[in-house]
């Protein structure tokens, strides 16, 4: 039986953020586009492209349900798009908003979503500068699809950040790209992982696992600036679809490295772990919407974590491992009982439609 990309029809895993999606994009999407001359081009599959020092990204949002504990499709659309700009080492300047609405949707719901979107945009200081609205017949979409794009400029702290890193080793890219991690670099996560996916799944399916678990959706521009001010950061990514496991494996593949990660050092809530145990889901493969994974030179790791913990969104930041020399790009996870296992990249997202 062939893999999913050999099938004649699109399947859910083609949009899941895992290995199947990566293959689908390369084979069936980007292969049809003209090659672009850019510092960070489309086919690098970083969180944003960089063209003539303009940082540019776009996002589609199909969240189900529209409202969930800790957020909604409006807040997640702003936060997710702003974060894709910020993790490149850039400052978001403006957003676009494109709405596709199902005929028959209550206008009160539309207004509630857009009020949330406006509050989130105002809160992170990024205006919504342009947009478009379409309405399709009932049944053609599930209530609402929201598409957001953003542009940004190089952070005023990025150059000084890289100057710190280059005191310890050569840095190949001017941006915080997936291919910029090197053996010895420390790996940091800014807080608890898995909250968003479990909160949304529990609410959507009525599982009621743990009322304390809420989505972590948040714009991370301020937190990331805190890290850049400290200096020594070489790579950043927000671990959305596919979660932490997908982010770490992408870095290994693109940077041609290995990693050793300590499971005990990864911030995980008991409610998330218990829910994942019941469902047979790896919490490291679940999407997040308010976390950043950071690769930095090892000499600056503790100082970066110290500064991140002073920020409200980074109070639980932790060093979780380091990059290694390896002929095979893979993540080795040290378990709590002292064993080791390979942390595989997820084939698909165990919790669909969470962003």
Image (spheres, rainbow, N blue to C red):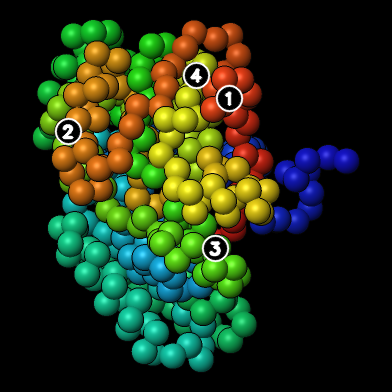
Where disc 3 sits, the SS reads: loop
Cα distance in 3D space between marks 2 and 3: 33 Å
Front-lying residue, 147 or 272: 272
Residue to which mark 1 is pinned: 337
Where disc 1 sits, the SS reads: loop
Q: Earlier in the sequence, mark 2 or mark 4?
A: 4
Disc 2 versus disc 3: nearer the observer: 3
Contact, CB < 8 Å: mark 1 with mark 4? Answer: no
Residue occupying image coordinates x 38% and y 82%: 110
- Image quadrant holding the N terminus, namely top right
Residue occupying image coordinates x 30% and y 55%: 218
Residue to which mark 2 is pinned: 307
Of all residues shown, which one is farthest toward the front? 337
> Residue 251, percent across and down?
47, 26
Cα distance in 3D space between marks 4 and 3: 31 Å
Disc 1 versus disc 4: nearer the observer: 1
Q: Is residue 33 visible?
A: no
Residue occupying image coordinates x 57% and y 51%: 274
Task: Please give the label number shown on residue 260.
Answer: 4
Front-lying residue, 319 or 85: 319
Contact, CB < 8 Å: mark 2 with mark 3? Answer: no
Cα distance in 3D space between marks 1 and 4: 15 Å
Task: Please give the label number shown on residue 209.
Answer: 3
Position of residue 232 relative to residue 122, above or below, is above
């Amino acid at each position: 039986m062939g893999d999913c990309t050999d099938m004649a029809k699109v399947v859910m895993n083609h949009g899941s953020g895992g290995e199947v999606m990566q293959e689908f994009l390369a084979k069936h999407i980007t292969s049809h586009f003209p090659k672009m001359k850019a510092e960070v081009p489309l086919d690098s599959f970083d969180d944003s492209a960089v063209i003539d020092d303009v940082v540019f990204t776009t996002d589609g949002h199909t969240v189900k349900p529209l409202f969930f504990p800790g957020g909604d499709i409006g807040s997640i659309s702003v936060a997710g798009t702003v974060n894709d700009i910020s993790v490149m080492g850039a400052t978001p300047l403006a957003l676009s908003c494109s709405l596709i609405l199902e005929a028959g949707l209550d206008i009160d719901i539309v207004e509630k979503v857009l009020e949330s979107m406006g509050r989130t945009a105002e809160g992170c200081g990024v205006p919504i500068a342009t947009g478009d609205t379409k309405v399709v017949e009932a049944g053609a979409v599930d209530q609402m699809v929201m598409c957001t794009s953003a542009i940004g400029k190089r952070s005023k702290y990025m150059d000084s950040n890289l100057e710190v890193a280059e005191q310890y080793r050569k840095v190949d890219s001017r941006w915080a790209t997936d291919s910029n991690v090197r053996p010895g670099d420390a790996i940091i996560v800014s807080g608890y992982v898995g909250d968003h996916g479990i909160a949304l799944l529990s609410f959507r399916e009525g599982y009621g696992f743990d009322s304390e678990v809420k989505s972590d959706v948040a714009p991370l521009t301020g937190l990331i600036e805190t890290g850049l001010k400290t200096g020594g950061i070489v790579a950043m990514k927000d671990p959305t679809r596919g979660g932490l496991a997908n982010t770490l494996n992408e870095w290994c593949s693109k940077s041609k490295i290995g990693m050793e990660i300590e499971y005990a050092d990864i911030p995980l809530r008991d409610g998330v772990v218990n829910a994942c145990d019941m469902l047979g889901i790896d919490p490291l493969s679940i999407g997040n919407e308010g976390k950043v994974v950071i690769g930095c030179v090892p000499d600056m790791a503790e100082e970066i974590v110290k500064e991140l913990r002073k920020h409200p969104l980074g109070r639980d930041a932790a060093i979780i491992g380091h990059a290694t020399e390896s002929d095979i790009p893979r993540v080795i996870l040290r378990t709590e009982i002292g064993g080791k296992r390979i942390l595989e990249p997820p084939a698909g997202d165990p919790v669909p439609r969470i962003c």
